[in-house]
Image (cartoon, rainbow, N blue to C red):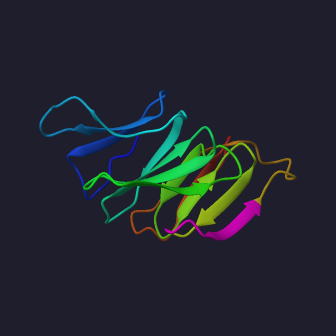
Amino acid sequence: MSWPKNSPDKLFIGCADGKVAVGLLKAGQKSDTLFNSNSYVVSVAGIPNTNYVLSGHYDNSVHIVNYENLSVSKLITHTSIPFCMSAGRHIAISGLDMKVTFYDMQGKLINKSDYSKDNTVKEFSGCQYSPSGDSVVFLNFNKF
């Protein structure tokens, strides 16, 4: 689920049936489908100061959706299921492969760190950019 700062009346929800839905909070309306894929949605992230939201799927794909004109495109095929995803200066993704990966907004790989051989690191369970979009925190079992 994602609630972008620049769209306070919209809540974006990823669904098990592959849909990315939007709930219009001011109107109290039920959700409408923005995008429908054939793969379970595992993560959703709004891109700050834009009309875009990202959806991560069980088939390792990441899609970018413009929620104003409803255009959708596949942005990335990640190396694992993108369970943790956030957007700020870059797109940050982590998953069960124990890797932290950064992409630019066009889907180009910026940086990747592999923690799979570090016995102190367990699965990543979340990530979030700071409000400025310059720093990101990853949650890892019992530490940041």
Is residue 10 highlighted in magenta? no
Q: Residue 52's x, y, as percent?
A: 36, 58
Residue 128 in sight in this render: no
Expressed as whole percent of the image width and height from the top left, the position of residue 128 reads 50, 54
Residue 16: % across, % down: 49, 28
Q: Is residue 3 above or below residue 108?
A: above
On screen, residue 121 versus residue 119, left or right, reads left
Tell me if 13 is positioned left or right of 128 in this view.
left
As drawn, which residue projects farthest toward the left? 27
User: The N terminus lies in which quarter of the figure?
Assistant: top left
* Residue that appears at 49% across and 51% down: 63
Compared with 30, 122 (above or below) is below
**Vertical arrangement, residue 138 with respect to residue 24, above or below:** below
48 or 19: nearer the eye?
A: 19
Depth order, front residue of 15/84: 15
Q: Where does residue 60 sit, x and y in percent of width and height?
A: 63, 45
Locate residue 32: give its quadrant.
Answer: top left
* Number of numbered discs visible in the structure rendering: 0
Q: In the visual, does 103 lie left or right of 18?
A: right
Q: Which residues are magenta?
A: 105-113
Residue occupying image coordinates x 53% and y 46%: 56
Q: Is residue 48 left or right of residue 126?
A: left
Residue at image position (73%, 54%) is 99
Q: Is residue 114 visible?
A: yes
